[in-house]
Image: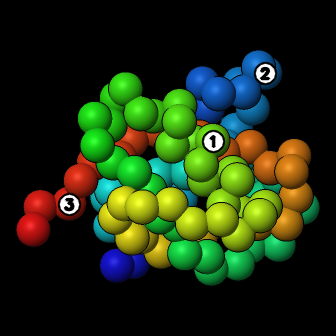
Amino acid sequence: GQLTTRECSCSSTKDNAPCFCECFMHSICLWFTERERKRVARTSIDVILQLQSQREKEREVVGEVAVLQLHNRSYSGRHHRVVTGATTTSFILSISSFSTPRQ
């Protein structure tokens, strides 16, 4: 379960600024800009994602992650631990790729 950081192309930002991807177990990737990376204190949080019909649910899942960070709400689904910023509402979160791990 090593967490890796790599440079990536941020299609979620308007200015195509350099950004970084945080990936956990090749399952969930979060991306954020360098400015956010320096500004936001990173903490380990438990994220519960609903992973049924991944493509249809992608936008919904992104919203759930944001809500979970800010309000500590929980949702039914698979449990993943990811490292990301959890202290500001301006932190940009996107899921670039995710899948249900095989059992």
- Is disc 1 placed on a helix, strand or loop? helix
Among the two numbered marks 2 and 1 on one chain, the one whose residue lies closer to the N terminus: 2
Q: Hey, what amino acid is under mark 2?
A: Asp
Q: At x 34% / y 29%, what residue is drawn?
A: 55
Tell me which numbered mark, 3 or 1, is placed earlier along the sequence.
Answer: 1
The amino acid type found where label 3 is placed reads Pro
Q: Residues within 10 Å of mark 2 (few under 14, many from 20)?
A: few
Q: Residue 67 at x, y = what percent?
A: 70, 53
Q: Which label was assigned to residue 63?
A: 1
Image position, residue 60 (x, y; %): 53, 36
Location of the C terminus (image quadrant): bottom left
Q: How far, Cα to Cα, is label 3 from label 1? A: 21 Å
Which quadrant of the view contains residue 80?
bottom left
Secondary element under disc 2, as helix, strand or loop, is: loop
Residue of label 3: 101
| Residue type at tag 1 | Gly
Q: Is residue 48 left or right of residue 86?
A: left
Name the residue located 65 percent from the left edge and 27 percent from the top edge: 12
Residue 9 in sight here: no
Label 2, label 1: how far apart the Cα atoms are: 22 Å
Residue 85 pos. (x, y %): 74, 64
Q: Is the Cβ of the residue at disc 3 closer than 8 Å to that at disc 2?
A: no
Q: What's the residue at 53%, 31% (across, down)?
A: 59
Would residue 14 be seen by someone viewing this image from the given angle?
A: yes
State the residue in front, 5 or 85: 85
Give the label on residue 15, or none: 2
Numbered marks: total: 3
